[in-house]
Amino acid sequence: MIMRPRLRKLALAMHLTVAVGWIGAVLAYLVLDVSVATSEDPRVLRAAWIAMGLVVSSAVVPLALATLLTGLAMSLGTKWGLFWHWWVVMSLLLTVAAVLVLLVEEPVVTANAARAADPTTSTRALLAIPPTLPHSVGGLIVLLVIQVLNVYKPRGLTAYGWHRLQGQRQRFERRRASAGGSG
Amino acid sequence: MERAPGGPAANEDPGTPRWVKVLGVVVVAVLVLALAVALTMGDDHGPDRHTGRDGVDDPPPTASAEPGHDRPGVAAPIAIG
């Protein structure tokens, strides 16, 4: 069902807000992750890990889930559809992959944050916790690719979209022909 | 409500666009690379990899621990003189 213009604008505003917020939250996480990778000061490491745990559980995960849900609503409620256009399909696949990796990583980051927050955790143990740079950098690249796809909307109908479009065209032609014949 | 028959990209070739193929190849290459790195590193890639060193208990906190001295791959300063 196609959304009415006012509802579509509201859904678009929500989708843009949470999607850009997701990128911002990942950037904030990346700054902390770089601090973990480069610093040898236990105070910085403890603070960074605790903040990373909070950023992931309170910002990155909720924004990622909200982006997926609002993106599904936007594609199903507008002319673009979910499986009609390649840019929508690729955006969906990349978003689902990013969310799945995030949901696997979130407990790991939370556990590390708990270790860092524990005052009995030794400095040696703190220094031994490796940063999560491959995931944060890779995640940011994936989000930027999705953003480019959504802004540029490169052309290309899927086979499903093309067949559906042909069906609609035929129905439209039949209706026009019958209207012309009766009038 | 029905979609407009003359919607976006109505006259397009239904074949897979080049950009989709390029993006697909890049994604597969990155996945293969990540898998190769994970296999090369053995157990170092997985949900448990960030939680310490193979389940070995941490030594108790020491008052003399200083930044950088115990970091894996970071050499301790050499005492001169």
Image (cartoon, rainbow, N blue to C red):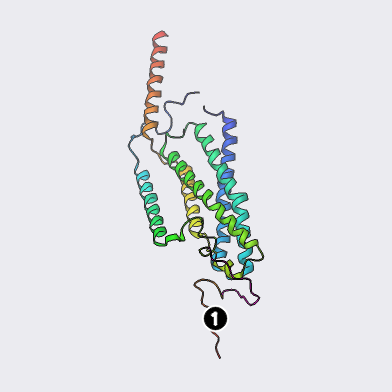
User: Is residue B63 located in the magenta-colored stretch of the structure?
Assistant: yes
Q: Quadrant of the C terminus of chain A?
A: top left
In the picture as drawn, the residue positioned furthest to the bottom comes out as B81
* Percent of width and height locating residue A132: 52, 59
Q: Main secondary structure of the magenta part?
A: loop
Disc 1 chain ID = B
B79 or B58: which is nearer to us? B58
**Residue A156 % position (x, y):** 38, 38
Q: What residue is rendered at 43% in x and 42% in y?
A: A90
Label 1 sits on a secondary structure element that is loop
Q: Is residue B10 visible?
A: no
Q: Using the rendered view, name the quadrant where residue A125 is placed.
A: bottom right
Percent coordinates x, y for residue A52 in the rendering: 60, 57
Kindly tell me whether residue B7 is visible in this rendering. Answer: yes
Q: Which residue is found at the position 62% from the left and 62% from the top? A: A116
The boundaries of the magenta stretch are B55-68
- The residue nearer to you, when weighing B5 against A40, is A40
Query: What is the quadrant of residue A154 in the picture?
Result: top left
For the residue carrying disc 1, how many other residues have a C-alpha within 10 Å: few (<14), some (14-19), or many (20+)? few
The amino acid type, in three-letter code, at marker 1 is Pro
- Foreground residue among A24 and B55: B55
Taking the image as shown, residue B51 lies to the left or right of residue B3, namely: right
Q: Residue at x 58, y 44 (%)?
A: A18
A168 lies above or below A52: above
Give percent across and percent down for residue B11.
36, 31
Task: Identify residue for label 1.
Answer: B77
In this rendering, is residue A41 above or below A18? below
